């Protein structure tokens, strides 16, 4: 899918710089990517077919998604602002309140999103991918960057 | 034109039914069989129209008339739908003539039109495969940005594939072998099995392999 198609799907990308950083793949989704996993599709589906942290309820609720990220060391925080030494995640929800997407903040303060079964993109603000598919960011979480190595999606120094 | 009224359960509206006895009693108590409806259903049987397409045509004719429509109108709509579905150059040419003719019978194109429909009649298996491909394409396009498995699996096109039942399994397996995708909900719904071990959950390529291996072991061919 070319950038023009992405901009049709996500009109917020039209007026802001962004970069496609991977090929399209079905191997992982936005939740996995935000959690730093590029080998599995994370979702609390009813049939128990997809990956979801075992101790977390398989429910499509914000609380369950916050718990899923808490299981890998994230805690809730106030906003999307860049904080030195912290890695942040934004959880998106549509108007019905159900989680729909997640994005992860990179060291330079920009964000990385896996767009469903499409590509990963690097975008400036969490709101750049708002719209009918994802709604908007409703919860923010953070964890300490303990790993001296760059996270997934980050350029190596 | 004669107008007939039918109940929703009228067997003459079931294109799969061999019964064409439905009709109504006239004022003199004689049973009148609506020949136009029979012609329409015979026409349907001679074409490659899917059940879904047929239902759409019937509903489009039925609802605005509050349960009553003319057999000529239905027949006309069926022919149009069948020709549009064929989309061969000749079919589109005939459609143009067909639409330009106020009263379609007698119509000098009638025989040619029926021949075109009959010549392009699809076998049920080919028809199913074509419909599957249409639905799969729609599903992929409209779900490309989604992460929610529930949203992906409850998309109308996906649900129509699930509704095809076991006939769809070889078609799904063929797709899965070509390119792993989220066919697992459909396979589980149709077969009521899930051969994916817990350690493979979410790993789409491995899940695909598990399903293909399971299907081979049970004699599925695709």
Image: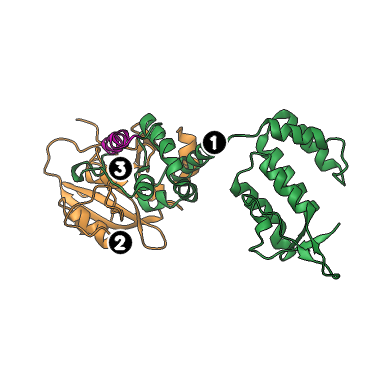
User: Residue B125's x, y, as percent?
Assistant: 53, 36
Q: Secondary structure at mark 1?
A: helix
Span colored in magenta: B204-219
**Chain that the image shows in green:** B
User: Is the residue at mark 3 from the same chain as the one at mark 1?
Assistant: no
Task: Point out residue B16 in the picture as x, y percentages from the top left corner.
Answer: 61, 49
Between B137 and A29, the one lying in front of the other is: B137
* Colour of the chain lettered A: orange
Q: Which mark is residue B130?
A: 1
Viewport quadrant of the N terminus of chain B = bottom right
Res. A125 in view: no
Q: Secondary structure at mark 2?
A: loop
**In which quarter of the view is residue A27 placed?**
top left
User: Quick one: label 3 or label 2, which is nearer the N terminus?
Assistant: 2
On residue A61, the disc is 2
Q: Which residue is mark 3?
A: A110
- Graded by Cα atoms within 10 Å as few (under 14), some (14 to 19) or many (20 or more), the crowding at tag 2 reads some
């Amino acid at each position: 899918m070319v950038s023009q198609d992405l901009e049709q799907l996500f009109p917020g990308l039209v007026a802001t710089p962004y970069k496609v950083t991977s090929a399209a793949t079905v191997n992982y989704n936005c939740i996995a990517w935000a959690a730093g996993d590029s080998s599995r599709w994370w979702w609390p589906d009813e049939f128990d077919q997809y990956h979801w942290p075992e101790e977390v309820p398989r429910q499509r609720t914000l609380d369950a998604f916050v718990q899923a990220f808490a299981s890998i060391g994230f805690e809730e925080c106030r906003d999307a602002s860049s904080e030195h030494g912290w890695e942040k995640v934004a959880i998106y929800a549509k108007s019905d309140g159900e989680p729909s997407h997640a994005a992860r903040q990179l060291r330079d303060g920009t964000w990385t999103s896996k767009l469903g079964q499409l590509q990963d993109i690097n975008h400036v603000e969490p709101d750049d991918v708002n719209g009918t598919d994802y709604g908007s960011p409703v919860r923010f979480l953070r964890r300490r960057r303990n790993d001296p190595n760059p996270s997934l999606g980050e350029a190596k120094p | 034109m004669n107008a007939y009224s039918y109940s929703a359960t009228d067997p003459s509206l079931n294109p799969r039914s061999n019964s064409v006895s439905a009709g109504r009693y006239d004022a003199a108590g004689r049973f009148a069989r609506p020949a136009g409806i029979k012609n329409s259903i015979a026409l349907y049987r001679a074409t490659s129209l899917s059940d879904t397409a047929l239902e759409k045509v019937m509903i489009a004719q039925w609802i605005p008339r509050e349960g009553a429509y003319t057999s000529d109108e239905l027949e006309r709509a069926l022919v149009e739908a069948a020709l549009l579905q064929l989309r061969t150059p000749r079919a589109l040419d005939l459609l143009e003539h067909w639409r330009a003719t106020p009263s379609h019978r007698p119509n000098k194109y009638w025989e040619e039109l029926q021949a075109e429909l009959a010549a392009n009649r699809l076998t049920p298996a080919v028809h199913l495969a074509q419909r599957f491909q249409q639905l799969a394409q729609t599903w992929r396009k409209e779900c490309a940005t989604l992460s929610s498995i529930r949203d992906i699996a409850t998309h109308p096109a996906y649900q129509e594939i699930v509704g095809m039942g076991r006939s769809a399994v070889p078609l799904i397996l063929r797709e899965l072998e070509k390119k792993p995708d989220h066919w697992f909900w459909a396979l589980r719904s149709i077969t009521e099995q899930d051969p994916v071990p817990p350690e493979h959950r979410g790993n789409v390529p491995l899940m695909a392999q598990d399903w293909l291996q399971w299907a081979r072991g049970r004699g599925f061919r695709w």
